[in-house]
Image (tube, rainbow, N blue to C red):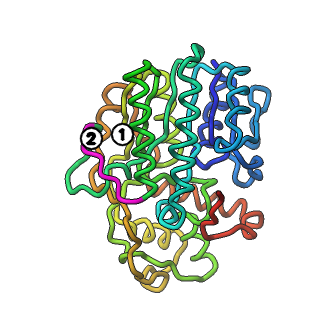
């Protein structure tokens, strides 16, 4: 079985590649715009590359080269992780988010719609497309994005569903919540909090950290993506979520407990970010009942795993940025 992973150099994309290579059942083509990440950020760094090939290509500017690679590889499954993904940054660079998340995707999908080799095209979307409803959201809940990032992901989802309806394009959509785990970008909440505490710094809690969020371990998300590809139906949307929701400050409390730091001394409250989505109840009964998926990694254990990764790679990671750096 051949799988093409677009955005394979991303946090989620690289973990999915690792899952595929671990299974030993797949030949994998990875495509991303940047050079492969250093081993400290690459979960599959120690895997055999016998069944994996990487191509550095930009979905925005090298679509013809990407199409040629896909035609030569002829993957049955194509998974798209390629996206501009920081919600707060999308207010500063809205055009870039729409270019990557919508325009480039439209060009890619339009070129693939006549390719018989594609059995499934899985789009990795986001729970942010639902906005911040008070009620539990299901796959049929109204879409109410609240940021340029969320709007761009919503547009991508609707485009793919339109291609399914009009061309029988075998699109699938997976909507996960906030993801975390080892190898994540250091500006994200869990690794950044751990690094700040280890350095004796203070963690800023936007809005006091009272916003409710669903946090899913990256390996549970990868397992969900593979289940959708192998057993899910075309033209379907699948929410993917853990069993519980937590306030942001609860995650930071766990981090403080694991590292032996007093929460009140390690944090300070700051103004909330603009247009943040906050899905408080995220229903994933569809993927659980239809595909037999369920989360396996408990939150505290998952956060401890991030700590173990940071400890192992501390010297390699300390030269890295702790803030988001935008790339066009």
Residue 66 pos. (x, y %): 70, 32
The question of residue 61 being in magenta is answered with no
Q: Which residue is mark 2?
A: 138
SS assignment at label 1: strand
Q: Which residue is mark 1?
A: 239
Q: Position of residue 286 (x, y in %)?
A: 30, 32
Distance from the alpha carbon under mark 2 to that under mark 1:
7 Å
The residue that appears at 63% across and 26% down in the rendered structure is: 3
Residue 167 in picture, x, y percent from top left = 44, 19
Q: Residue furthest bottom?
A: 265
Residue 12 figure quarter: top right
Name the foreground residue: 221 vs 266: 221
The one of 170 and 166 positioned closer to us in this rendering: 166
Q: Residue at x 50, y 31 (%)?
A: 122
Is 325 displayed left or right of 220 in the figure? Answer: right
Q: Which residues are magenta?
A: 140-147
Residue for point 41% across, 50% down: 177
Give the image quarter of residue 283: top left
Residue 145 belongs to magenta span: yes
User: Magenta region's main secondary structure?
Assistant: loop
Residue 52, position as x, y percentages in the image: 74, 30
């Amino acid at each position: 079985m051949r799988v093409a992973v677009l955005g394979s150099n991303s946090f989620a994309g690289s973990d999915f590649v690792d899952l595929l290579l671990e299974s030993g059942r797949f030949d994998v083509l990875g495509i991303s715009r940047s050079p492969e990440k250093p081993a400290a950020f690459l979960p599959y760094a120690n895997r055999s590359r016998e069944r994996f090939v990487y191509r550095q290509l930009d979905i925005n500017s090298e679509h013809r080269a990407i199409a040629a690679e896909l035609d030569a590889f002829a993957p049955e499954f194509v998974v798209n992780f390629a996206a501009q993904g920081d919600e707060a940054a999308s207010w500063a660079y809205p055009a870039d988010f729409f270019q990557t998340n919508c325009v480039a995707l439209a060009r890619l999908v339009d070129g693939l719609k006549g390719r018989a080799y594609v059995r499934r095209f899985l789009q990795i979307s986001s729970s942010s497309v639902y906005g911040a409803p008070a009620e539990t959201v299901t796959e049929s809940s109204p879409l109410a994005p609240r940021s340029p990032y969320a709007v761009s992901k919503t547009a991508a989802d609707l485009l793919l569903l339109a291609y399914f309806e009009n061309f029988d394009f075998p699109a699938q959509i997976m909507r996960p919540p906030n993801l975390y785990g080892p190898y994540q970008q250091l500006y994200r909440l869990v690794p950044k909090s751990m690094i700040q505490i280890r350095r004796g710094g203070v963690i800023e809690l936007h809005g006091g950290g009272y916003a409710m969020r669903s946090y899913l371990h990256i390996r549970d998300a990868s397992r969900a993506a593979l289940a959708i590809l192998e057993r899910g139906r075309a033209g379907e949307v699948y929410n993917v979520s853990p069993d519980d929701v937590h306030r942001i400050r609860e995650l930071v409390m766990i981090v403080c407990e694991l590292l032996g730091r007093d929460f009140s001394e390690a944090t300070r409250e700051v103004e909330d970010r603009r247009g943040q989505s906050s899905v408080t109840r995220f229903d994933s009964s569809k993927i659980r009942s239809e595909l037999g998926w369920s989360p396996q990694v408990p939150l505290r254990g998952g956060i401890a795993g991030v700590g173990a990764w940071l400890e192992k790679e501390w010297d390699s990671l300390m030269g890295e940025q702790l803030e988001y750096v935008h790339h066009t």
